[in-house]
Image (spheres, grey):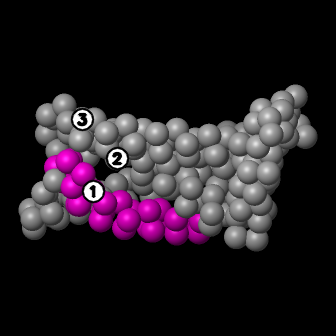
Amino acid sequence: MIDTVVLLIANAVLIAIAVLIMAILYRNGGSSCYSADTLVDGHSRLVRTVSKLCYGAKGEGVRYILVGALCVDIAWEIYAVLAIAGINLVVCNAVSLVLSIMAAFVLNKLFVFESRSLSLKRTEREASLFFLGRLFTASVNFFGFIILCDLGLDFPLLGIEGMPSKIVVSAIEITLNYFISKYLVFMSRDIYREH
């Protein structure tokens, strides 16, 4: 049972990564020697549909949800593997947070908020604010997880101990992260001049 759940989660991560890559390739198809049509060979309608969703009127929100789901999947996958290995649940949670935050910065910068600046000053600013914001929300996640487990949400779900607490704190964390990223970290590109 547990092996099946882990396999399904891993599969979901791979599918999400594939969809994100296809959307990025389609978006940048003209600047690459490999177009999305060539790579997916016959599945270009799917690629165009995903691209419209990701870059249409509500594209930023859709991209944030996709990236957020991918980062939560990464955190949950790491948490599940470590928990199944018998590692302390608090350590499992901390490790999964750190690794998913690293992935989140790259994906949010490039894919969600499309901040493609390579200027050292701008990237340092974004990274500093992003990691400070994530430190705050990771603290909410970390201590919220402990509190919820102490309140009795440490029972197994999907065969993984403490998963109900992980789900609740992840939902709170995603919401806080969006507002911090949108209104503090990756503000309009016109506000900061490149040097």
Image check: 101 left or right of 144? right
Q: How many marks?
A: 3
Q: Residue at x 56, y 46 (%)?
A: 16
Q: Residue at x 10, y 67 (%)?
A: 151
Give the main secondary structure of the magenta stretch: helix
At label 3, the amino acid type is Leu
Q: CA distance from mark 1 to mark 3?
A: 14 Å
Residue denoted by label 3:
82
Residue denoted by label 1:
166
Q: Quadrant of residue 82?
A: top left
Q: Is residue 122 visible?
A: no
Image position of 120 with respect to 34: above or below: below
Image position of 63 with respect to 90: above or below: below
Q: Are marks 2 and 1 in contact (CB under 8 Å)?
A: yes
The secondary structure type at the circle numbered 1 is helix
User: Which residue reaches farthest right?
Assistant: 30
Query: Could you say where residue 123 lies in the image, as x and y percent from the top left?
Result: 64, 44
